[in-house]
Image: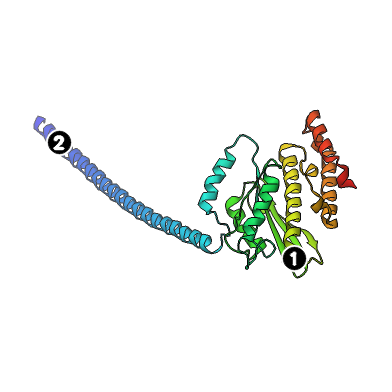
Amino acid sequence: MGRHAQSEMMKSNLEFREHIQKIRNQYSKERLEDQLLFRRESYELGRQYLIEQTLAQYESRKKMADFADFIDNYWPLASTPFAVLENRKDYLERKSIIPLNVLIAKTEATSSLRDTSLYGSFCENLISELQNKLPGITIEKSPWCRSCQSRISEAMNINYIMGGIPTLIIFPYQDGNILGIETVSWSFGRGLQSMNHTKLLQIENVDSKEVTELALSAVKAIIGMTRDAYMLAEYHAPAVYPQLVDDKVLSVPMLRKHLRDHYNDMKKLVGSPEFKQLCSKEELQSIESSLNVKLLNA
């Protein structure tokens, strides 16, 4: 009986061991399969990562090529976009008032094929007459590297780089005996929706000999008006240009009317409850006083 019991125990023990071995074998097989699956997944992920890196590098190089093409063929200014971007950092890090950046386009009204220095002289005259008298503006000298080809397209290209920097672009143009002025401006907003494109003036029957002088007077007036509107809207600062406007500007009926209408609109804005609640009593008095100029209302 003892031998029989011992034999049964050995038989049971062998069966148990075989069962355990089967479990081990199955576990080992599953573990190998899991390891193989893990290695294959890792390999697939590595390959996918390399593909994505290649595509990202391709897109980066394509953008670089597109940007180089943009600079070579579509960027209208003499300053490179890289210089502009570097200067933008300095602008936006300022704690004081950020000036309005003024760009005068190189057009048939501001330049001449016979006199290549005319465009530079036109900008220098504006700088000498306005830069130190009108606070809050920066007029760039000869910003266009070549003659303007398309007013709105070139303005959009400049906005692509300079969006967010308060900017006024002035396009004086000549069409026969008509002198016209178009402007594109934006403040701190970004994107094309922030651009304000305006056809401001069309002065007819202009003598060809008077185009440059008349364009200079018109551009001065537009810079002064836009500067005052910008400083009023962004910093609640009083107007300055009405005290500086000269007789040459006022001698042009259309310019005089445009000045009067512009500052009357500013008066209406200042008189609105929405504007008043943003100003202190002293600020409001200073602004109202700056707009009360009889010369403009005559």
Residue 21 located left or right of residue 280 = left
Q: Is residue 275 visible?
A: yes
Amino acid type for the residue under numbered disc 1? Lys
The N terminus sits in image quarter:
top left
According to the picture, the residue beneath numbered tag 1 turns out to be 209
What's the distance in space between the residues labelled 2 and 1, CA to CA? 127 Å
Q: Residues within 10 Å of mark 2 (few under 14, many from 20)?
A: few
Q: Nearer the viewer, residue 21 or 297?
A: 297
Residue 72 located left or right of residue 268 = left
The residue at 89%/46% (across/down) is: 297
Amino acid type for the residue under numbered disc 2? Glu
Q: Nearer the viewer, residue 287 or 243?
A: 243
Q: Quadrant of residue 2?
A: top left
The answer to whether 194 is drawn above or below residue 274 in the figure is: below
- Mark with earlier residue (2, 1): 2
Q: Position of residue 199 (x, y in %)?
A: 76, 59
Q: Position of residue 245 (x, y in %)?
A: 79, 47
Residue 90 located left or right of residue 226 = left
The residue at 82%/39% (across/down) is: 270
Counting the numbered discs, the total is 2
Q: Quadrant of residue 137?
A: top right
Q: Nearer the viewer, residue 185 or 24?
A: 185
Q: Position of residue 107 (x, y in %)?
A: 66, 63
Q: Residues within 10 Å of mark 1 (few under 14, many from 20)?
A: few
The answer to whether 13 is drawn above or below residue 207 in the figure is: above
SS at circle 2: helix
Q: Position of residue 132 (x, y in %)?
A: 68, 42
Q: Quadrant of residue 183?
A: bottom right
According to the picture, the residue beneath numbered tag 2 turns out to be 8
Of badges 2 and 1, the one in the foreground is: 1
